[in-house]
Image (spheres, rainbow, N blue to C red):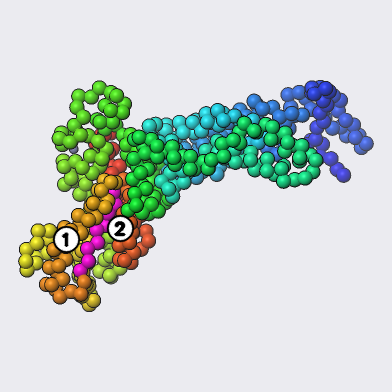
Amino acid sequence: MRFSLEKCATVEVKRGKLVEGENIRLADGREMANMKAEDRYKYLGIQQTYEIKQQENKKAAETELIRRTRKIINSQLSAKNKINAINIWAIPTFTYTAGILNWSKTDLENLDRRIRTTLTQQGMLHPNSVIERLYLPRKEGGRGLSSLEHTCLKEEKKITQYFEKNNLPLHQWIAAQRRIASTSRNIQEEDPAEKLRNKWKSKALHGRFFNSLQQPEVDMTTSNTYLKQGYLFPQTEGTLQAIQDQVVPTRTYLKHILQQQVETTKCRLCNTAEETVQHLTSGCTTIAGTKYLTRHDNMGKVVHQLICLQKELIPHFTPHHVYAPQTLKENQQFKIYWHLTIITDRRVEHNRPDMVIFDKVNKTAIIIDFAVPQDQNLTKTYTEKITKYEALAQQIRDMWKLKDARIMPLIISANGLVHRKTTQHLLELKLPQNTIMWMQKAVILGTVNIIRKTLYPH
Ligand SMILES: [Zn+2]
């Protein structure tokens, strides 16, 4: 056997204390150095001497965790990728020490808070936003960040289980030691995600969006598309969450929640309604004809272009933000109206839906109308749209002798919630899978833009 002496050292321990010893002289005359009191060696990633210096190692783990988190936050990654990078590049260096270094619950809570502060400094997380949501999976409306508290506990448990399962006396001895050390810890055995959901739900203000998400007419999977795709800028995702959490500084929020002195709680734009976040994002008459209309049309334009491509009415795809629909598109089989008044034999009150698709061969028509209501009004809006265009559908059925004339309201709330019927209708229209992503993107960017322009004009 050949010793690589530069990698070797000896330690001498007398009565539990490290003492300075002699170098060892090997048979071939070379020497193995005795470790000095200030020296450390790294074993499986942990600095050790004859014992593990807890404070020193903990400090190093913390420093590395925060260094990596900062580096990620200052990068150009998108919202979701930043969170992912923290989960797979920053947090594992830390959780690696779980079960070896003694992290108390308070230690872990403090570090979780430090990570959140870093996110807040970069505008990724509003300081008054709901914390629990940050740690829930993106597919259920969370942001998908791992919490140190949970990951460390999980890691510790895994190590303990490893020793429990092995039968060597040494393993058993360690298992017994760990049991003594961790009795105080393992009591709380509740599913961490369930605990987070319950906490989010129970909050008076933040809980409203949780409940909106759980409405039976909401397509939860599709509604969280923007979170799963994660294409938003980190700051935009942070602002959108703040809007959904209703913690943006509207006049009613300043007065009733932050208890600040404000002259009036009336809307700064229309000066008639109370200035709430719902009012600003979907109820203000002053911007109904401008900002709401743009948002609504941007969502509709996505569908118009994709339908036209599908029916071969336009030759190629144009980026959605520059696409401008023509009021009439027609070929041998199809005719598409965009915001065009339909002249009927008998006058009907509502004769200008957003879109109408005529199929001349199959003798059918589909009336499409878009809407961006408040979260709570999804069902109401859907029914209203059906009622609104019933007479028109009847008229065109008779006038053009159609086999069928259907109404398809396509609805996404100002906060991005997708009505189940919207998903269903898009399937019926056989549009590509990413249609909903583009529609939702148009809506949420519109909403964030309205709030930014109104509440943070500088
Ligand atoms: Zn208003």
Horizontal and vertical percent position of residue 450 = 25, 41
Q: How many marks?
A: 2
Task: Please report the residue visible at 68 percent of the width from the left and 43 percent of the height from the top.
Answer: 161
- Magenta: main secondary structure: strand
Direction bottom: furthest residue: 361
Q: Is the distance from the Cβ of mark 2 to the nearest ligand 1 atom less than 8 Å? A: no
Which residue appears farthest toward the left when viewing the image?
A: 346
The one nearer the camera, 360 or 9, is: 360
Task: Say if the magenta span includes residue 411.
Answer: yes
Q: Residue at x 75, y 45 (%)?
A: 166
Residue at left 59%, top 29%? Answer: 104
Q: Which residues are magenta?
A: 405-413
Residue 37 place in picture, x, y as percent: 76, 23
**Quadrant of the image where one finds ligand 1:** top left
Please name the amino acid that badge 1 sits on: Tyr
Residue corresponding to mark 2: 422
Q: CA distance from mark 1 to mark 2?
A: 17 Å
Examine the image and state in which quarter residue 130 appears: top left
Question: Would you name the residue on which mark 1 appears?
Answer: 389
Residue placed at 67% from the left, 27% from the top? Answer: 54
| Mark 1 touches mark 2? (CB < 8 Å) | no
